[in-house]
Amino acid sequence: MAEITKSRPGENMRLVEALQYRLPVAGVVSILHRASGGLLFVLLPFIIWMFDTSVTSEISFDRFASVFTAGVGPLPGFVVKLVVLALVWAYLHHAIAGVRHVWMDATHSVSKEQGRSSALFTLAASLLLTVVLGAKLFGLY
Amino acid sequence: MAINYGSKRLVVGAHYGLRDWLSQRVTAVVMALFTFVLLLQVLTPGPLGYDKWAGIFAQQWMKVLTFVVVVSLAYHAWVGMRDIWMDYVKPVGLRLVLQVATIGWLVGCAGWAVQVIWRL
């Protein structure tokens, strides 16, 4: 165990310390990739519940649709819409950031400039698509 | 090279480097293709109501594809969540509990999804 007990820089960094670091854009995409994946994992039962109720029968489909207007339990409909909006963003960001990884692996395009521009693209594309789908979700078109 | 057997054996970390790296990408590509295939069917002309939505998943090939995606997702999420636990949770006992809970969570979710697919 001796080899692994030697201390490494940053090993005992607290979260508050880590939050004080200014990240480059690629770093922001990276931590959001992790955060969005964690969110999708935590809300996985809700995603499957939506799949279940939307696809099982016409009656359950109506129940699925009504949750977005009438809400569920103490939660009003717009809160459900906000949760789904967060899931939409998490999925888009995670997927686009993932494609970015595969792209970098496949083309060996690993440079500081490419890392920055593709990170900016990931942030912008996922946010833009979230706005477009969110507008649909909230009935703006 | 450091001694890595007996009492000196390195017992922490994943050590599945290449396998995890590759499986994370293969499962991701499967899910991306599924997204594309599903989008193509959702965006066909006509209103998107229950009939069209359920009709997409009623096809046998779509059920099989969805099943492959469910398994891919569970494995993908396992690799990712284990990375998160290994990075942030240092006490071995707590980490083990979280990892076992993660497996239970994912297997449970996958079972539910499979039930939904083949009840249709």
Image (spheres, coloured by chain):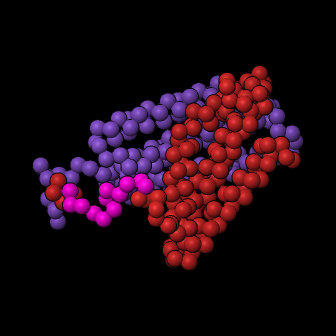
Q: Nearer the viewer, residue B30 or A31?
A: A31
Q: In which quarter of the view is residue A121 placed?
A: bottom right
Q: Position of residue A18 (x, y in %)?
A: 43, 59
Chain letter, purple: B
Q: In which quarter of the view is residue A26 placed?
A: bottom right
Q: Nearer the viewer, residue A32 or B27?
A: A32
| Residue extending farthest top | A59
Q: Is residue A65 left or right of residue A8?
A: right
Instruction: Give the colour chain A carries in the figure.
Output: red
Q: Nearer the viewer, residue A89 or B106?
A: A89
Q: Is residue A80 above or below residue A97?
A: above
Q: Is residue B112 visible?
A: yes
Residue B35: within the magenta?
no
Magenta segment's dominant SS is loop
What residue range appears in magenta? A5-16
| Residue extending farthest left | B7
Q: Is residue A103 above or below residue B118?
A: below
Image quadrant where one finds the N terminus of chain B:
bottom left
Q: Is residue A118 above or below residue A19?
A: below
Residue in view at x 55 percent, y 61 percent: A29
Q: Position of residue B25 (x, y in %)?
A: 50, 56
Residue in view at x 51 percent, y 46 percent: A38
Residue in view at x 46 percent, y 65 percent: A21
Image quadrant where one finds the C terminus of chain B:
top right
Q: Is residue B19 left or right of residue B39?
A: left
Q: Is residue B49 above or below residue B29?
A: above
Q: Position of residue A61 (x, y in %)?
A: 75, 27
